[in-house]
Image: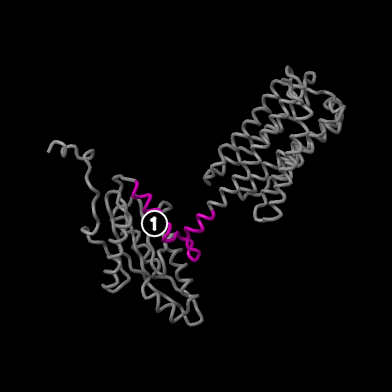
Amino acid sequence: MQLDSFTVLVAGCTFLIFLGLTYIYFWVRDRSTPALLWWGIPLILGGAALTLYARPTWEFDYLSISLGNAVRMLAIGCLWEGLRVFHERKPLLWPLAVAVSGWMVLCLMPGFADHLLSRVVVASLINGTLCFLAAHELWRGREEVLQSRTPLIAVFVSFGTIMLLRAALAGVTPFPFGAQAVDPIWLGGFMLAAFVHSTFAAFLFISLIRERREATQRTFAMSDPLTGLMNRRAFTAQAERSARRRGHQPVSLLVLDIDRFKSVNDRFGHETGDRMLAAFAAVAEASVRPTDQLFRMGGEEFCFVLPDTNQRGAIEIAERIRKGFELIEIASPKGNAQSSVSVGVASADHTVDLELLLAAADAAVYEAKARGRNRVVLAEPGTIPRPALTETEFPERRRA
C-alpha cells in the first residue's frame, strides 16, 4: 500500500502545531516551567516549516531550501535549549545561532544552493548533532531519577542516527532521505518518521515535568520546612524499607534533643527558637557524611541514621555535633541565645529494625538528660535486639 505523502504531511503538521499550542497554553497558566515555552515554540515552528513541502515546486524553491531547513534546525535546537532550561542550566545560544546562520549563508552560494547532495548532507549533520546534544543534556541530568529520561534519550539518539544515516547514504537514496529523484513512498516514510519521533518526544516532555512535580511533592511531604531535614514521616518510610533488608553491615542511630529549648523560646521568643533549630540543622549537616540520613522528629528532637557506622564512628560524629552546636550563639533583641544538645547513641553490627534502634537511643538520650545534659550516652546493649537466626545462616541447627 502506497503512503499518501500529502495526507501524512498535512496531518502531521497539524498535529505538531496543535501540540505546540497546547504546550504554550500550559506555560501561560503555569510560568514556573519555562521549558514548556522552549518546547512549545519549536513544535509550532517545525510543523509550520514542514508545510513548505506542500508547495508545488518545493524541490527548487529557495524558500523551502533555505528558510525551511533553517527553521527545522532552529526547532531541534530549541528542544535542546529547553532541556538545558529544564535542568536549570542557562541556554547556550551561540552554537544554535552559528548553525542556523551558517546554513543561511551557505544557501546564498549558488554552488551550494543548486547542489542537492551537499544540502542534504550538511542539513542532516547539523540536525543530527543537535539531536545528540539534546540526548547528552538528558544524560548529564541522570542523577535526578525520572522514568521518562531513558526513552526520551532513545528518541533523540534514534532521530540523530537517522540523520547521520541520511548524510551517509544521501548519494544513493531518494529524496528526502537522499539526493536522488523524489519518491513519494520515501517522502511519506521520512515524514512519518519525523512525526512519530516528534510526537513521542512531545509526550515524554510532559511526562518529565509530571514526574518531577510528583517527586517534588513527595519531597515536600517528607521534609521539614524549617530545617530542610527529613521529617518523622520520612523516617517511618525509611524504617519500613530497612525492615525489608537483611545484612551484616553495622548501623548506628543518634537521637539528639536540644537542652532547655522551651526556656529559649520563653526567654528569647519563638523566632529565635526557630533560628536555633535551623542553626543546629546546619551544624549537624556539616558534621555528617552525604550518606547519613538526618530527620527532625518534631519539636527540638532529631534522629540521625548512620549506615555502615559502628559504635566508635557514631560516638565521634555525635561528639562533633555536640561540640559544634555548643559554640553557636543566636543574636536576638534580648541578648544572645545559646544551648547545648544531649545525644543518645544506639549501634548494631547487623541490619536491625530502625524503630527498635530508635527506642534504644531514645532511652539513652533520657539518660543523658538525667546526667546533666550536654553529653553523649550509649544505649545499653541489652536494649538492642539481635535478629532471629535462620537455618541458612546456621546449618548446624538442621543437624540438631
Magenta: predominant secondary structure element?
A: helix
Residue 312 position, x and y percent, is 28, 56
Residue 43 position, x and y percent, is 73, 41
Residue 82's place in the image compared with 384, above or below, is above
Residue drawn at x 42%, y 63% is: 296
- Considering depth in this image, is 14 or 357 the residue closer to the camera? 14
Residue occupying the far left of the picture: 400
The residue under label 1 is 236
The quarter of the rendered structure image containing the C terminus is: top left
Magenta stretch, residue numbers: 216-244
Residue 345 position, x and y percent, is 30, 61
Residue drawn at x 71%, y 40% is: 77
Q: Is residue 251 magenta?
A: no
- Considering depth in this image, is 204 or 135 the residue closer to the camera? 204
Q: Is residue 238 magenta?
A: yes
Q: Residues within 10 Å of mark 1 (few under 14, many from 20)?
A: some
Residue type (three-letter) at the residue carrying disc 1? Thr
Q: Is residue 92 left or right of residue 289?
A: right
